Each structure stands twice: as structure tokens, then as C-alpha cells.
Image (spheres, helix red, strand yellow):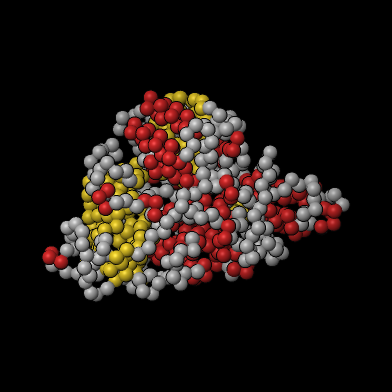
Amino acid sequence: MKKTIKRNICLILTIVLTISALSGCGSAKDNQTTAPELSENSNTNAENDTSVTNDNDGGTYEAAGEAAESADPSDSLSGSSASVEQSINDAADSLYSNKAEKRSQSAMYDAEVEDCAPYTYCYGEPNGEEYNEIDEMGFTSVALNPLSTFSADVDTASYSNLRRMIEWGYSLEDIPEGAVRIEELLNYFDYDYALPKKGEPFGVTTQIADCPWNANTKIAMIGLKTQKIDFSEAKPSNLVFLIDVSGSMYDDDKLPLLQRSFSLLTENLTSKDKVSIVVYASEDRVVLEGVNGSEDKTILEAVNGLEASGSTDGSSGIITAYSIAEKYFIKGGNNRVILATDGDLNVGLTTQEELEELITEKKKSGVYLSVLGFGTGNIKDNKMETLADKGNGNYAYIDSLTEAKKVLVEEMGATLVTVAEDVKFQVEFNPDVVTGYRLIGYENRQLAEQDFADDTKDAGEVGAGHTVTALYEIVTADAATTYSGTTLKYAKEKKLPNEEWFTVNIRYKNPGSSTSKLQSYPVDKVKYVKTPSKDMQFAMAVAEFGLVVNNSEYKGDATMRTVIDRLKTIDTKSDEYKDEFCYLVRRLEKN
């Protein structure tokens, strides 16, 4: 039975603890992992409910739960547990093949906490996972520094990785430090922001409202959105699949899931596209080179024929993949390497600094990079985030076939087609209105003030159909304050009315250009509303959740319960991903 399915139905431990025939939850072919101890708040009793939804695979645990409930414990002692195990296997197979009907996540959300099904969860030890440290930003005085400068970020890996942890039973105490980047939680979702005006790459939406977790502050929202495209009508693509086939990719949530994910992508390629496949383990190897995108059978046979073994010389694979991408480079087209890995590079260039230097050099070729993370237990999130950031690309974590469909099919244009490069934000606050501010998230995306107008400084890329959301917690005041520094828009001598709270300045480059363009959006008191839009309400709930999970010193009155209560006032049923978020918040509280 698939390892991932065993993890998902670890409730069987409560009825077959003495069955030696079962190999144990979460055991791999040649390496067994153990479940860390759950916190005191985590309920490990499986007697109240047996219908937790595995929303990621579109199935339900009801069949497995019913099999467990109907089993006679004495059967296991007498060695006649085969029928029970077969029932559970059948249920698991149904889960894995997506044939079972999906239980409504909103139904779980509407239920009381006590109705959430308590199970004993098994999952890989997180000790081998690596995350970059997050140095949370505090409040900045507008008098001392009225400019806030940061790079756009469209990565979503942190959200789906957190979902994986929640689904596998992690409590708040189990979630590794640095694993939750609030901006990636925010940017996982789609928002109904203004679309771009003619001739502009994106539209901008702004709004100000009272802060839900701090009665003394307000929240300013900045939303950016690009126009979606039909990938079939996009420019030709030159894609190189760079696939990690090292021994660490053996598990079912790694190479097997990767193969199924790439099958979804392949189905959407056409004759105008070119596909190459490079694999790496102890050494790199070219599997396919310059194959027509319409030859899906050839591509799928090559992908599905891969097996995992050996060490991980990722740097050699990267060099080879970029060489192939340059060989088949399409001028004016979409040239991209898609790296699929758990990030555990242990041969060749292995440190984060070495990989950053390598990929910074390679991106000069004009080839973009998308990074897809897989697996658990040994995820090197820090390396994958760095590769995507420095490689003019994006980073997503694939925890299920549902997520693969979202990233590689539903959001194919956003994932694979760049519409704006080196996108930078610089917000200038008016000291007559705002005395202090704090950008929520984006700690790893901060830029120096002078970097904003420096076109040699790298920043984030935004794809077709992406939304970018930034939230500031701000302190307002009636009295003007003193400040020093460069010439500013809100300098006293300009005598501007203090109706403007701040101005959003955005710099970006058209793909392939070396010169940036500037757009500015003043935000005045009209943007302050007592009842914020549904998008802003949801975004604030997501940010509040992130503050609680990270145990932020700025979380104020926020708790898991206040997040749940706030979400009850927001209609999320029309958006399956926002609806799932409601479910996950409850699930984490129950864990």
C-alpha cells in the first residue's frame, strides 16, 4: 500500500497496535521514520468521528473509518485481521485513485471543533528539513524612514507545505521555525483585484481598514493583478524538465507524485512547444532533447520510466539543463527550466551560497526557472527558495495531485509565462497622517531604499494571472512629525493636503528589457472604509492566522479562535481553495 495512504489512514494504529503483520505507518522501503510526540492539545483518540476528509486527493476517510469501527479487536489477536486490512486497503486505493467523492470542506468548517475527527497521525520526522530564518520586522517610524522598499513575491510553497503539515497532524509546536512565510500564504489565493489598464502589465487595488487584532492600528492593503492568458495561445515554449531521481526521491510523495504531476503538464503542451528532460542523481543524464510538445506519448514514457537511486549532484544537472535550454532557445518565446526536487543536494555545489552564485550566473542566458518541491522529512526549502528567487522564477510545493493540477494546469500561465520582471514596490508614507508602519511578511524580500531605482538590482518576476498582496499594519496620528533624508513627496515645503496617506510606487521591466518603468498610485482618505471588501477581510484573516502560527510578538489579540470566528463571517464557499483554508484552520486548532 502506498506510503502516503498509510500516513493518511494512520487511525488503524488504534485498533491494530498488536498486529505485527503491518509494517507500520510512514515506513519506507528501506528507511522507517517515526512520529514525533503530539502536543497535549492534540487528540489521539479515534473514537468520536471517522470521517476526516483528505481534501488534497479528493477522497474521504469514511470507508477506512467504517472498516476500523466494525473490526473486532480479538480478530487481530487471533491472527485473522486480513479482512480488516483488506477493507482499509480498498478504501486507501479509492483515496489514491481519486474515485471517492470529496466531502465538503465547508461542512467540516461549519461543524463545531468537537466534531472534528481525532486521529493518531504518523508523519516523517522534520529534523532533516531546512528553512531560512525569518527575522520578523517591527514597526518603523515614518519620521526616520518614510520609505518601505521590497521585491514582489509570487511563491506559494509555504502555504501548501504548511497544509501538508496540518493534514499530517502537526500541532503549532511541531511546525518548524521559518517554514511559514506569511506573504506566500497571502499570495496562494486569487483575489478580485482591478485588472490592468490598456498598455499596463497589472492593475492595482488599495484599501485601508481597522486592524482586526490591534485596536490601535489600521491595515493598508495593496493588491496587484495581471491578466490571465490561455496557455494554448501563449508564445512558444522551450521547456526543460530537470528531475531529481536520487535515492531520496524514492517515496510515493516524491518521484511517483512528480511523474503524475508532469503528466498533467504534458497534456497541455502543443506542437509549438519543445520539451527536453534532464535527470540527475550521482550524475546527470539527458533523457529527451528538443521533442515536439505534441509527442505526449514519448514524453510520458520518458517521465514514467524514471526510477530513484543514488546521491544528488543537482548542480551538474542545473548546468546541463541550462545548456539544453540555451541550445533550443526560442527568441521572444518562453524559455524555462522546471526543476522538480526535494532540494536535498549533497554532491557538487551543495551550499545555499554556492547554488545562489551558480543560478545568478545562469539566469543571464534569459532562461527562467520554476522550482517544484516534493516530499517530506528532508525538504531543503531554503535551497529551493533561493534557486527560484535568484533564477528569475517561482517556487511551489506539490503536496498532492490536486496541487499539481492547480500549479501546472489551472495556473499554467502564471507558473510558466512571465509578464513583468524585477517588480519592486516602494511605499512612501505621509508623516502628517501615518507615524509608523510594519510590512507583514516579505522579510526575505526587503530591498535598500536606493535599490528601487537601480535597474541592476534583482527583484521578483510576476506571471500571467498572478495576484500579489501586501499588507501594512500602520499607526496613524493627527500631528505632524519631523523627518530627515532625501527629497520626498510629502516634504513640508510642498504644502500638500494631508488627505493622502501614502503613495505606492512600482517599478518593473518588460520581459527581456534592461530598463525599468515606473507607476505610482496615491492612496488618500477615501480608501479608508469601516467595512472592508471581502478580499481584504479574507487577506486579513490569512495574515492573522500566519501571525498566530509564527507566534509573532505583533499578533496582538489574535488567536486561532479569533481567526475561526472571523472566517465564519466570510463567504468562501464559491472558492474551493479559500474554503479549504477555513477547514485547515480548524484542523490545526484540533491538532
The vertical placement of 295 against 167, above or below, is above
The vertical placement of 127 against 256, above or below, is below
Residue 403 locus on image (x, y percent): 51, 47
In this view of the protein, can residue 494 be seen by the observer? Answer: yes
The vertical placement of 261 against 74, above or below, is above
Q: What is the count of numbered marks?
A: 0
Which residue is painted at 28% across and 36% down in the image? 512
The answer to which of 436 and 272 lies nearer the viewer is 436
The answer to which of 265 and 182 lies nearer the viewer is 182
The answer to which of 373 and 354 lies nearer the viewer is 354
172 relative position to 530: left or right: right
Q: Quadrant of the C terminus?
A: bottom right
The answer to which of 128 and 234 lies nearer the viewer is 128
Residue 197 locus on image (x, y percent): 25, 51
Residue 86 locus on image (x, y percent): 75, 47
Q: Quadrant of the N terminus?
A: top right
In the image as oriented, which residue stretches furthest toward the right? 78
Which residue is painted at 60% across and 64% down in the image? 590
212 relative position to 308: left or right: left
Residue 424 locus on image (x, y percent): 30, 50
In this view of the protein, can residue 231 be seen by the observer? Answer: no
Which residue is painted at 23% across and 52% down in the image? 519
Which residue is painted at 68% across and 38% down in the image? 30
In the figure, residue 483 lies in which quadrant? bottom left
The vertical placement of 325 against 82, above or below, is above
